[in-house]
Amino acid sequence: MLLYLHGLNSSPQSHKAVQTQNWLAENHPDIPFVCPQLSNIPEEAIADLEARIEAHIDASKQPVALAGSSMGGYYATYLSEKYGLRAVLINPAVKPYLGLQRYLGENINYHTGESWIMELHHIEQYRALEVEQLLTPENYWTLLQTGDEVLDYRLAEQKYRDGKMTVEQGGDHSFQNYQRFLPEIYAFLFGGNN
């Protein structure tokens, strides 16, 4: 199973999630693709993801791989370390609790139009999920673009430096032309060839 984790205030309809789903359906339909709508409350999001991972492993005895963009990359790091999973991180958040104050109060989801509230205790929930030191850096491939206008790519470059890393000049937070990496992402996560 490929569990794709979208970013904060996003949804399963995000461009990269849809590209990933379509590529897998065309090239590896045997790999289930799951991209749940993540709760805006960190504790709820993580509890849902843990339940999905454990249910899949228990039911199928097959591996789970993670792909996470932005805040989804932050969650993927926590889950990768907890369950020993391989993960591809796309412009991941590293210390999101330091910059979330601007979201305090009411927010509107970019894709769904849903209104939601961020409170101070939610920021502390993000802090509680931080992985201080990677125990299995070889499980990560981090894709960064230096033109990311939302997150400082250098934080991720430093944190994930002992794993596989691609740093491209320019680009933006959405990671321009992401789809060209999908065959290599599949090979990294599942050990196969395109």
Image (tube, grey):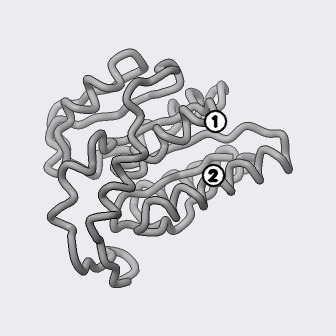
Q: Nearer the viewer, residue 31 or 53?
A: 53
Of callouts 1 and 2, which one flags the residue occurring earlier in the amino acid sequence?
Answer: 2
Which residue matches tag 1?
Answer: 83
Residue type, label 1: Tyr
Does 120 sit left or right of 27 as displayed?
A: left
Q: Nearer the viewer, residue 61 or 19?
A: 61
From mark 1 to mark 2, how far is it between C-alphas? 9 Å
Question: With respect to residue 35, does 163 lie above or below?
Answer: above
Q: Quadrant of the C terminus?
A: top right
Marks 1/2 in contact by CB < 8 Å: the verdict is no
Residue neighbourhood size for the residue with mark 2, other residues' Cα within 10 Å, grouped as few (<14), some (14–19), many (≥20): some
- SS for tag 1? helix
Q: Nearer the viewer, residue 140 or 125?
A: 125
Instruction: Locate residue 37, reporting x and y percent.
Output: 51, 68
Residue sitting at the far top? 162
Residue type, label 2: Glu
Instruction: Locate residue 175, reporting x and y percent.
Output: 29, 46
Q: Does residue 153 appear in the picture of this structure?
A: yes
Q: Quadrant of residue 6?
A: bottom left
Q: Does residue 73 appear in the picture of this structure?
A: no
Instruction: Locate residue 98, reporting x and y percent.
Output: 20, 48
Does 117 sit left or right of 37 as displayed?
A: left
Which residue matches tag 2?
Answer: 50
Q: How many marks?
A: 2
